[in-house]
Image (tube, coloured by chain):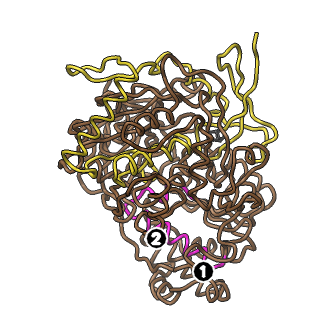
Chain colours: A brown, B yellow
Amino acid sequence: MTNSIPEVEDADCIFLIGSNTSEAHPLIAHRIFRAVGKGAKLIVVDPRKIQMTMVADIHVRINYGTDVAFLNAIMHEIIKNNWHNPEFIKERTEGFEALEETVKKYSPEMASSICGVPPDVIHEVARLYATSKTSNIMYTLGITEHSHGVDNVKSLANLAMLTGHIGKPSSGVNPMRGQNNVQGACDMGALPNVYPGYQVVTNEDIRAKFEKAWGVSLSPNIGKMIPDMMDGLIDGTVKGMYIFGENSVETDPNIHHVRHALESAELLVVQDIFLTQTAKFAHVVLPGAAWGEVEGTYSNTERKVQRIRKAVEPPGEAMPNWTILMEIGKRLGVKMHYETAEQVFNEMTSLTPSFAGITYERIDKTDIQWPCPSLDHPGTKYLHQEKFTRGLGLFHAIEYRPSEELPDDEFPVILTTGRRYAHYHSRTMTGRCAALDREFPRPMAQIHFKDAERLGLADGDSMKVTSRRGEVITPVRVGDVVPEGSIFMDFHFEDANPNWLLGTSLDPVSKTPDYKVCAVRIERQED
Amino acid sequence: MDYKFVKTTCPFCGCGCQMLLEVLDGRLIGTLPFKGAQMNQGKLCIKGWNAHGFVQSPDRLTKPLIRKNGKLQEASWEETFDTVASRISDIKTRYGANSMSFLSSARCSNEENYLLQKLCRAGVGTNNVDHCARL
Ligand code: SF4
């Protein structure tokens, strides 16, 4: 996030897009409710009537996967009505002319025919967002998990730069990270192109610094992203895979494909706390200690580095993950000698300028958000205050591209997926928390009552969902949360997991799969 | 009776709520919201209130396992560490460093993620490391 969570409360306008906040980020939703209580205008852009829409000033019920057309039209209106911020554009950005040229085509009427949002609503959203004193864009996977996810993100950045609603309190572009430490995993360089702190592997000086510290020579080539690793296992360019704390078999799209990939591995090592569906494919399984049994840190979605602490002993011979990694590293000849997690942390900060001022001792006493370059630096509450990371902010002129798999005669219904408030991913953890299991014991596909009536489905009945990849059977919840012609499925339950159905269409840049738009056929399933 | 609180961060979503783990005689028995935290200001959601539940599940893995004759069988840590290291080296020698790949975890700590990417980069010599942020 460019901003901090408490700042959400003080925004004049909140532009929430592709985020089911009250279920996925309950304590951020709480801040949004408070902001509304203080008079903020809330715009919720989502095809579904999620809970957030109940407190929204405007619910934009956009067609699935048409965000770029909608956002371009908003920018069209902003420029037409002179609501943009020429001063900010001149001083802080470049590439405005190309953007202006592109969005010219996207009149509200033209965009409306794609995204299904009435022109007067587009106009009103543009006015509210642009003319409010502070406007905060907040989004999650409803924006990124598309075959054009990067286009969506860039369009939101365009919108913020066009109006200058970035680089100040309560104004920015804020992706909320779904997992406890997605932010941290990125920050720590668990990515094929960067070392910790986003230091690129292709930069010679940076590489030399890490080579010196680690005492080895390092690869100058960018590595493979997950989808390429999986494909590599199948085509034989990848032979071995080490999976750490990840249940790929249940959480990646197109389960048949993932299973085939893991079966093809010559060596599969899985390090986890349970014998997950993924671990069952492994040649070696390493039992790690869990949260509550180890010391360490997580970075939350606002870049705040916070401690986790050991409260109890791990069961049996389970061992802290950092010890396991160290023991294997040592045997592979790497310099790794640590007695505590803190020593690992300190080695990391010594190599990572944006973390250089963070210590266990400091975060014990006070909240610190990176970048924090020195011990006397207080940390950074919001980013891009004076300038953007690359200097000038770059506008990207982006054309709307339809989602890759749209409904047709054979598969006429749109399937979209997401999470539910009581669960987490494949439920390996939340399914084992008694109260959470009671709260939400079964999968439930949301279906519009008219579609349900057509198929003769009552609430709780079973429905068969078929795509080009496979089929699953799931109980239904009838209502009007989803628009007609679409269904929503959560991905928490093994049997009714929509990942059996999803394809492998990817964003061409980020290689993020499309979890949000998939064509399916639905029918009643007799018990 | 030994009853204590241990301050920690919720293991579920990216909000990063602060909580106290309730520990009785070496067992986790509950969670409480940490009142002094600016993030959650004394609140937790339903997941946070129940976060301790999975840790002591009887299904936890308690011993390393190595596949022998097609079946996963219990092994000692020594044997397991040696097996993993020698099989990774073997793949590296036969097919090159880029034929190994590593999947890290958005569930695990900064320290663990740092070490995994170090293991991959310094121990094997490839940048084939990624995690599920893009999924
Ligand atoms: S308590 Fe709920 S909102 Fe807070 S971090 Fe945990 S899962 Fe997220």
Q: Image quadrant of residue A84?
A: bottom right
Tell me: residue A106, above or below residue A294: below
Q: Which of A326 and A486 is in front in this view?
A: A326
Tell me: residue A433, above or below residue A363: above
- Amino acid type at circle 2 is Val
Tell me: residue B58, above or below residue B34: above
Q: Mark 1 points at which residue?
A: A162
- Amino acid type at circle 1 is Leu
Secondary structure under the numbered disc 1 in the rendered image: helix
Label annotation for residue A510: none
Tell me: residue B26, above or below residue A473: above
Q: Mark 2 points at which residue?
A: A68
Residue A74 located left or right of residue A372: left
Residue B72 screen position, x and y as percent: 29, 21
Marked residue nearer the N-terminal end (2 or 1)? 2
- Residue drawn where x is 62% and y is 26% of the image: B52
Residue A230 located left or right of residue A97: left
Subunit bearing disc 2: A
Residue A256 screen position, x and y as percent: 25, 40
Report the number of discs.
Answer: 2
Residue A160 screen position, x and y as percent: 61, 73
Residue A378 located left or right of residue A259: right
User: What's drawn in magenta, residue-wise?
Assistant: A139-164
Would residue A431 be counted in the magenta stretch?
no
Decide whether the magenta segment is chiefly helix, strand or loop.
helix
Nearer the observer: mark 2 or 1; the answer is 1
Q: Is residue A242 visible to the viewer in this orientation of the structure?
A: yes
Quarter of the picture holding the N terminus of chain A: bottom right
- Residue drawn where x is 52% and y is 27% of the image: A289
Cα distance, mark 2 to mark 1? Answer: 15 Å
Residue A193 screen position, x and y as percent: 41, 61
